[in-house]
Amino acid sequence: MKAISRRAALEMFVAAPAAAALVWTPAEARQAHEHAEAAKVAAPAAPFKPKFFTAHEYATVSVLVDLIIPKDERSGSATDAGVPAFMDFMMIDQPRRQVAMRGGLAMIDRLAIDRFGKRFVSGTDRERRSLLDEIAYTSNPDRGLSQAIAFFSSFRDLTASGFWSTKMGIADLQYQGNVFVSEWTGCPDAALKKLGVRYDV
């Protein structure tokens, strides 16, 4: 894989809309998870080895996704669900998105170096969170952060797509679909009241 300089990556990243370069459809997300699951079955004892991400990028992705979806009392974290591997497969399956991803991760590191003198993964939890607080909101008016904000918004969406398309993520949603209902008695009164609607009789 041809390496590109951080400067070149950032220049390319700024030249193209970041958010558009990282948007995936639900079908693409499902396909990537199917590939990831197939790879796990083929070599269950071997630890996952990324094909697109460098070791440092993969570590950065792992930290970022777990800050977005941490482990809680209901389910595991994004890394527990295999989101970093999912993202690696997405990059291989969708090469046109590689520059945006690589450039975005480099930009996160550049911001971290500017803010606390070290790359993102080397920062403390507090430092990492303070940086993400700057780029987590699309309403942030700081034009100097617009590309980082666009990248992180798309990265967060991809993290969510990866997590909630897994068995763990579906269980986390407590999805109750595909259950046979022998008798439909209408929407519960509490739900109708909350929505401010009623049945006309």
Image (spheres, grey):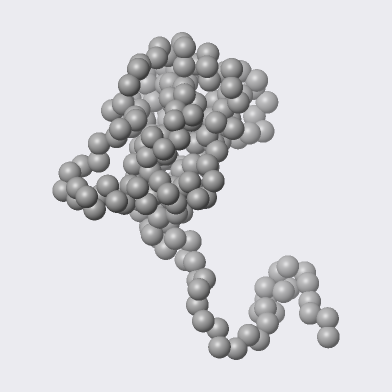
Please tell me which residue is depicted at 57% across the width and 18% down the height of the picture: 14
Given residues 122 and 109, the one toward you in this image is: 109
Give above or below for 125 relative to 30: above
Image quadrant where residue 75 sits? bottom left
Please tell me which residue is depicted at 54% across the width and 46% down the height of the picture: 25
The outermost residue toward the left is: 45
The percent position of residue 167, horizontal first and vertical second, equals 38, 59
Q: Is residue 154 visible?
A: yes
Give above or below for 64 relative to 197: above
Give above or below for 43 relative to 58: below
The percent position of residue 150, horizontal first and vertical second, equals 58, 30
Please tell me which residue is depicted at 47% across the width and 12% down the height of the picture: 8
Q: Is residue 114 visible?
A: no
Given residues 124 and 135, the one toward you in this image is: 135
Horizontally, residue 29 falls left or right of residue 119, namely right
Figure quadrant of the C terminus: bottom right
The outermost residue toward the bottom is: 183
Give above or below for 119 relative to 158: above
The percent position of residue 134, horizontal first and vertical second, equals 55, 28
The percent position of residue 128, horizontal first and vertical second, equals 43, 30
Please tell me which residue is depicted at 17% across the width and 44% down the height of the picture: 46
Given residues 123 and 138, the one toward you in this image is: 138
